[in-house]
Amino acid sequence: MAPRVGCFLLAVLISASCEVITSSNPMCTEDFHAIQVAGVTLSIPGPPGLPYATVRDFLFGEVRCQINWVREDTFQNHHQLNTIVLTGNPLIFMAETSLTGPKLLKHLFLTQTGISNLEFIPVHNLENLESLHLGSNHISSINLPENFPTQNLKVLDFQNNAIHYISSKDINGLEQATNLSLNFNGNDIKGIEPGAFNSKIFQSLKFGGSLNLSVILKGLQNSTIQSLWLGTFEDTDDQDLTSATFEGLCDMAVESINLQKHHFDGFSPSTFRCFTRLQELDLTAAHLKGLPSGIEGMNSLKKLVLSANSFDQLCQINAASFPSLTDLYVKGNMKKLDLGARCLEKLENLQKLDLSHSDIEASDCCNLQLKNLPHLQYLNLSYNEPLGLEDQAFKECPRLELLDLAFTHLLVKAAQSPFQNLHLLRVLNLSHCLLDTSNRHLLEGLLDLRHLNVQGNHFQDGSISKTNLLQTVSSLEILILSSCDLLSIDQQAFHSLGNMSHLDLSHNSLTGDSMDAFSPLKGLYLNLAANNIRIIPPHLLPALSQQSTINLSHNPLDCTCSNIHFITWYKENLHKLEGSEETVCANPPPLRGVKLSDVKLSCGLTVSGNRKKYSRFYTLFPHPHLTPNSWAQRHPSFKAKRGGTDEWVPKPSER
C-alpha cells in the first residue's frame, strides 16, 4: 500500500526565477532536520510511528508549500529515496531530470498540483515506479507519454479529474503493466472506445460516481477484473439501475463488484442474470427492503454485503439464493431488524456473520435464529438491543472462534453458561453488556479462550473477589477490565490465570494495595493508568518487578518520603514503564505535575528524646525557580537549613 499522503513532508524547492524560496507557511518550517540537496536546503522531518526503517528512505516534507518549480537534479544526492510527495503544490515546471538520483523511486504523489497534461511529468528515473497518484487535477486524457515506463506500475490514480472518454490508445499505453489498479472515481466517464479493454487484466478498476453504468460495463467487455468498484456518492445524481444496465457484465470476467448507494428500478431475479460468476457483491446502502426470491445461478458468490439497508426481517434477504456464502454482512440496518427463525439455515458454509448496529432484540437467542450454521467462526451481534441468552445459546454454531456482543445488554436466563459448548472460542467481547458478574458459571466451557473483554461491566461492591467468573478461563492471555469501577482486587483473584500476557485495568479506582493480586502473574503488559494509586507499599514492589511493561500514568501519585521506595523503584525500572510523560506527582502541591522520573527525593529519620524529627530532602530538576527557601515560604512548618536540606517538625496532630 502506498504511504499516507499526510505522513510526508515536502522539500522546499525553487521559485519561477530559479531562486531559493522560503515558505511563509509555518507548517513547512518547524521541527525539521535540514539536509542539502543540489545546493538548496531542504527540510526533512522524522515523524514518529511510520512503518519504515529509517527516515532517509523517504523524502518527507509538508504538502502545500507553494512550490512552483522543480529544477534538474534536485534529488541527485538522495539515492535511498523511494517516495516523493508534492501534493497541493501549484507546479508550473518540472525539469526532465528533476526526479533523477533515487535508485528505487517507487511512489510519486502529484495530487492536486494543477496538472492538465501527462506530458508534464518527467519520465527519467521512473523505471521502478509502482504507484502514480494524479488525483484532483485537470487531466482530460490518460494517454501517457510514449516512453513512460509502466512495467512495474501497480497503482495509477486519476480520481477527481476531467476524464470523460477512454480510448484504445489510452489503455494500450498500459499494456506492460500487470495486475494494475486504475482509479477513475469522480470522473464522469461518458464513453469508452469499443474493444479498449479487450483481453486486458486488472487488479481493480474504480468508476465511482459515473452517471451511466451501462456505458462503463459495455466498454469493459472481454476484460478480466478482480475488483470492480461502481458505487456512487451522496452528491451524485445518477440513473436508477435496471436489468439492462448490467448486460455488459455478461461479457466480462469479474470476481467482485461494489454497487454502494445506487437505486434499483424493477429489482427482480433478472437483475442478477449476469452476476453468476461473481464471488463478492457489495450492495451497501442500496435502499433495499429485500432481495427478490427466485434468483438463480449465484452458486459462486462467497461474500455478500447488505449493510445500511432497510430490511424488516433477516428472511427478506432470501439467503437460500446464495448457498455458497462464507461471509454475510447486514450491519447498520436502517430499521429494527427481526432475526426471524431459520432465515439462514441454507447457508451451512457460512463462516463470518456481522449483524451489528441493527437494533436487534430477542428474548430467546440464538439457536433458532442461527439454525444450521455449523461452520460459523465469526459472529458480531454488538451494538444491538437486549438479547436474552438461553442455555447453550450458540449450540448451532459450535465452531465459533470470535464472538462480539459489545454494547448489547445480555440477559442470561439460565444458571449455566450460555457459552458452554463453544470449546473453540478464542475471542469474546462482552464490553458494556451490563453483565451479572456475580454469576461464577458465566464463562464455563470456554476451554480455549485467549482474549476476553469485559470493559464497562460492574462487579459487586467494586471488587473482584477470590472466587469469581474468571477462574474458569485459565487459558486467557489478554484480559480487559478497564472502566469497571473497581476499588479493589483480592490477592487470589487471578491465581488461575498463569498464561496471561496482557491485563488492562485502566480507568478504575484501584489503589496501591491491589498490587498483591499480580503476584501470581509474570511477564505482563499491565495497564494501571487512570486509577487512584497514591502510594505503593515496599512489600508489593516485587509483584510489579516481575512484569514486562507497566503503565501508571494519570494516577494521583504521592511524591513524599512515604512513597520513597516506590519512587526509587520507578526510576530504576524506567525501561519497562510506558506513559512516563503522564506519570506525574499529585502530592505535595509544589511537586504537582512534575514527572516522577525527574524528582530526586532523599529521606532520613532521626529520634531525639521523646520527640521524632523527620528530615526530607528535595532536589527538583524540572522547577529551577523552586528553591528550598521558596518551598519553606510556601510551607511555614518547614525550616530551611544549609546545604539545601529542609527539616520538618510535625504538628501535634501529625506526630
Image: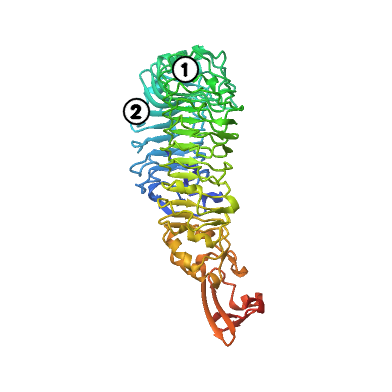
The amino acid at mark 1 is Ser
Residue 7 in picture, x, y percent from top left: 48, 45
Residue 401 in picture, x, y percent from top left: 43, 36
* Sequence-first tag of 1 and 2: 2
Q: Secondary structure beneath disc 2? A: loop
In the image, which disc is placed on residue 178? 2
Which residue occupies the foreground of this view, 570 or 57? 570
Which residue corresponds to the image point at 52% horizontal and 39% vertical from the top-left?
A: 90
Quadrant where the N terminus is found in the figure: top left
Residue 192 appears in the rendering:
no
Quadrant where the C terminus is found in the figure: bottom right
Residue 392 appears in the rendering:
yes
Residue 490 in picture, x, y percent from top left: 51, 57
Residue 640 lies, with reference to residue 137, above or below; the image says below
Instruction: Bin the neighbour count of mark 2 within 10 Å (Cα to Cα): few under 14, some 14-19, many 20 and up.
Output: some
In the image, which disc is placed on residue 321? 1
The amino acid at mark 2 is Thr
Which residue corresponds to the image point at 54% horizontal and 66% vertical from the top-left?
A: 535
